[in-house]
Image (tube, rainbow, N blue to C red):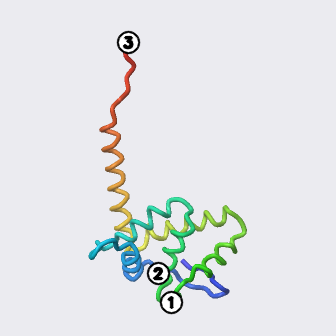
């Protein structure tokens, strides 16, 4: 996947460097489990959150381009419509889901979320009308 920033085309990389870059960004303690940053950014990219996209693109462009917020803002402002902007989010997430290094992390995350939702549904009491 390529993006054009300031007239130059750059390839987005979703490899080990991308995962490490996001892990460093989302590190909360002394250690972070490999892939924590990917799952965090993936969850945040489920809505068209521009700052989440900036963080993900910054990681995907490193070290070729140390994307600044100003460069990102100008790039986002270059979209012709809201639809075009939202479509890019979909394409970006699709690339994350199929890249060799991120695919298993996202698949695992989605499975955990699915299990949690299922458990919550099972634990939810059923409101049944009572006969008076």
Q: Nearer the viewer, mark 2 or mark 3?
A: 3
Residue that appears at 37% across and 58% down: 110
Of labels 2 and 1, earlier in sequence is: 2
Contact (Cβ within 8 Å) of mark 1 with mark 3: no
Location of residue 105 (image quadrant) = bottom left
Q: Residue furthest top?
A: 132
Which residue corresponds to mark 2?
13
SS assignment at label 2: loop
98 and 82: which is toward the camera: 82
Instruction: Please state the horizontal and vertical placement of residue 89, each as a whole percent of the image.
Output: 56, 66
SS assignment at label 1: loop
64 and 23: which is toward the camera: 23
User: Between marks 2 and 1, how big is the CA–CA gap?
Assistant: 10 Å
- Crowd band around label 1 with a 10 angstrom C-alpha radius: few (<14), some (14–19), many (20+): few
Q: Nearer the viewer, mark 2 or mark 1?
A: 1
Which residue corresponds to mark 1?
64
Q: Judge left or right: residue 123 versus residue 51.
A: left
- Quadrant that contains the N terminus: bottom right
Residue that appears at 28% across and 72% down: 33
Location of residue 128 (image quadrant) = top left
- Residue 131 bears which disc, if any? 3
- Crowd band around label 3 with a 10 angstrom C-alpha radius: few (<14), some (14–19), many (20+): few
Q: Judge left or right: residue 118 versus residue 72.
A: left
Instruction: Please state the horizontal and vertical placement of residue 41, each as a whole percent of the image.
Output: 44, 67
56 and 132: which is toward the camera: 132
SS assignment at label 3: loop
User: Between marks 1 and 3, how big is the CA–CA gap?
Assistant: 69 Å
């Amino acid at each position: 996947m390529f993006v054009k920033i300031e007239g130059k085309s750059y390839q987005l990389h979703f490899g080990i460097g991308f995962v490490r870059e996001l892990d460093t960004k989302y590190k909360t303690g002394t250690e972070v489990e490999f892939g924590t940053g990917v799952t965090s950014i993936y969850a945040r990219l489920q809505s068209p959150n521009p700052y989440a996209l900036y963080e993900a693109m910054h990681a995907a462009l490193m070290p070729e381009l140390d994307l600044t917020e100003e460069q990102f803002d100008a790039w986002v402002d270059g979209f012709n419509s809201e639809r075009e902007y939202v479509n890019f989010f979909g394409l970006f997430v699709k690339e994350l889901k199929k890249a060799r290094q991120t695919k298993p992390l996202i698949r695992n995350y989605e499975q955990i979320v699915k299990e949690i939702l299922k458990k919550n549904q099972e634990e939810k009491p059923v409101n049944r009308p009572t006969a008076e």
